Image (spheres, rainbow, N blue to C red):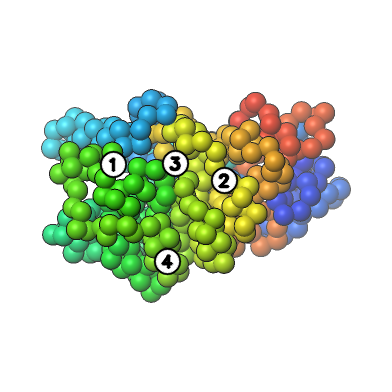
Amino acid sequence: MKIRARWVVPVGQPPIADGVVTIADDRVVEVGNGTSDAVVRDLGDVILLPGLVNAHTHLEFSDLRLPLGEPRMPFAAWIGRVVEHRRAQAAAADGNASLLEKRRAAAIAAGLAESSAAGVVAVGEIATAEWPTELDPEGPSAVGGVIFRELLGLAGDRQAAIAATAEQHLAGSPPPGWQHGLSPHAPYTVRPDLVARSCQLSVVTHAPIAMHLAESLAELELLASHSGELVELLRSLDAWHPAAIPRGIEPADYLSMLAQAHRALVIHGNFLTPRDWRYLAERKGTMSVVYCPRTFAYFGHGRYPLAEMLAAGVRVAVGTDSQASNPDLSVLAELRQVARAHPELSPESILALGTLASAEALGIKPDFGSIEPGKLARFAVVPVGTEVTDPVEWLLHGTDTSASQWEL
């Protein structure tokens, strides 16, 4: 089968006007242009690009109509809102675990549907419980990726149970189109030895690790001096165990642990240092940073050092985070936020963040991230005007984010 589009944007090579992609057995065979006597499906005035890849999501928040809290609120106060939201959901279920699980499954299903409708083909999902069994859709518009089982808790008497959860998750069979991974949540919610144990499991099972790190100044204050707003929040939740976290430990120490994993994603990395960037660049084959542009803007952190990270050689991918801090799950909208915030970067390098770099970060580059022979025929389609001469520039500076998955 051959499909033609006004523009084909393969990523990794220049856009092709009146491009034609040849597909056989659900894989790309050839990318070019021109006419052919073979069966051609003409998609008309659209940009055909590789399916977008969202390297960081929390889909269980996809039932929220608006982000939690207010823009620029203190990070610890927002975490408090997240806890309140989860407790309210549990209270509404009135102890009915089955009902709570059904609502979680419905939110995840809504997030997957929204992702597919936005041209996303794979996500790095942080899951607080095992994957709902009814969420096993297959077909051209199915979304897959990595299910990272979230691990958190500082209390000493919980560590054995948390470790058992990690091992059980990795021992289970993932749904079609998915892989299993682990997510030791953040430095203020997991013990360093649990991070190290997760990385050991990663080596044995080849499962990727994702960890929130250097996300806020409050996190850095907690690590440096066991003080600040996050400590006060954890105390109020009876979840602060100072002996569990060495005073003075730094993000660099966690990077050293994550470097032992088969593959590691550093989520956010908002306040990593140039020394940290160099460390990550030296380990680009297995370590990536995931930038969540609109969530970063929601908290008003300032300016993300994206250009500096890329110049240092760090692999940076893009994620939407959750709808607890973001209005939707559109990767294209994230890339447009990057274009607005970082005009010094080329359009091609920005587009790569949500395609090839995200696929590399998740370890799914053999199937996703670009349109080239051997990869799965999973594409995003964006309507475009006939007057457009630079499709990548137009993708990043247009006002309409109506990308969708291409289907047979």
Mark 3 and mark 2: Cα distance apart in space: 18 Å
Q: CA distance from mark 2 to mark 1?
A: 24 Å
Q: Nearer the viewer, mark 3 or mark 1?
A: 1
Percent x, y of residue 195 = 33, 63
Circles 3, 2 touching at the beta carbon (< 8 Å)? no
Whole-angstrom CA distance, mark 1 to mark 4, is 25 Å
Which residue is disc 4 drawn over? 256
Q: Which mark is residue 305?
A: 2
**First-in-chain label (4 vs 2):** 4
Q: What residue appears at the point 13 percent right and 37 percent down from the top-left corner?
A: 95
Label 3, label 4: how many angstroms apart (C-alpha)? 24 Å
- Looking at the image, can residue 113 be seen? no
Q: Crowdedness of circle 2 by 10 Å Cα count: few (<14), some, many (20+)?
A: some
* Label whose residue precedes the other's in the sequence (3 or 1): 1
**Image point (52%, 64%), residue name:** 279
**Residue highlighted by disc 1:** 228
> Which is more toward the observer, 370 or 304?
304
Up the image or down, 295 lies above or below 367; here it is above
Q: Residues within 10 Å of mark 1 (few under 14, many from 20)?
A: some
| Residue in the picture at 35% in, 27% down | 69
Label for residue 152? Answer: none
Q: Residue at x 82, y 42 (%)?
A: 18
Quadrant of the image for the C terminus? top right
List x then y, in percent, for residue 104: 30, 39
Residue 186 in the image: x percent, y percent? 34, 52
208 in relation to 8, above or below: below
Looking at the rendered structure, the kind of residue marked 2 is Pro
Question: Which amino acid, by three-letter code, is at mark 3?
Answer: Asp
